[in-house]
Image (cartoon, grey):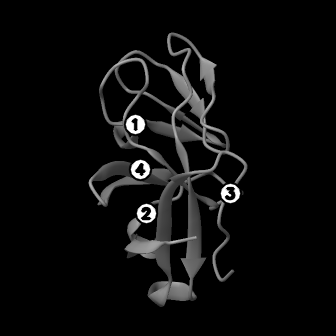
Amino acid sequence: MTAVEVCKLVDVPVPGALAVVVQGTAVAIIRDSAGHVHAINDVCSHADVALSEGEVEDCTVECWLHGSRFDLRTGEPSGPPAVTAIPVYDVMVVGDGDDAVVLVDITVNAARKPAVEGA
């Protein structure tokens, strides 16, 4: 994994999202309801809007514009009107507490697992 540091873990709300740019790609760093960290493409596949501005519930994010829902683990749409998956990226949390940082590799890998703090 060729990962780059994108933010501090404390900057990402639980649950919630933070928009970042990784090597020119818009990425949403999202913490689900359990605090796991996910990295997805920050553009809804249905309408060209930022998913980082949507609502996070459990392991899904809902697009604020038309209500499309996406699984944070796979990128697959779980609610209409979207029918196309979004890219999911490898993510890793390094360190503990306020010093923990989030690293992301923008190579698409839908089989990846969410990062756990202190891993």
Rendering quarter of residue 49: top left
User: SS of the residue at dot 1?
Assistant: helix
Q: CA distance from mark 1 to mark 3?
A: 19 Å
Residue type pointed to by label 2: Val
Q: Which residue has dot 3 on it? A: 34
Q: Which tag is nearer the camera, tag 2 or tag 1?
A: 1
Most extreme residue toward the top is 81
4 or 1: tag closer to the N-terminus = 4
The residue under the point 63% across, 29% down is 76
Note whether 47 is above or below 118 in the view shown: above
Give residue 71's position: percent from left, percent from top. 63, 35
Residues at badges 1 and 3 in contact (C-beta under 8 Å)? no
Residue at position x 30%, y 25% from top?
48
Marked residue nearer the N-terminal end (3 or 4) = 4
The quarter of the rendered structure image containing the C terminus is bottom right
- Residue that appears at 46% across and 19% down: 67
Q: CA distance from mark 2 to mark 1?
A: 14 Å
Tell which of 116 and 5 is nearer to you. 5
Residue where numbered disc 4 is placed:
28
Q: Amino acid at mark 3?
A: Ala
**Which residue matches tag 1?**
51
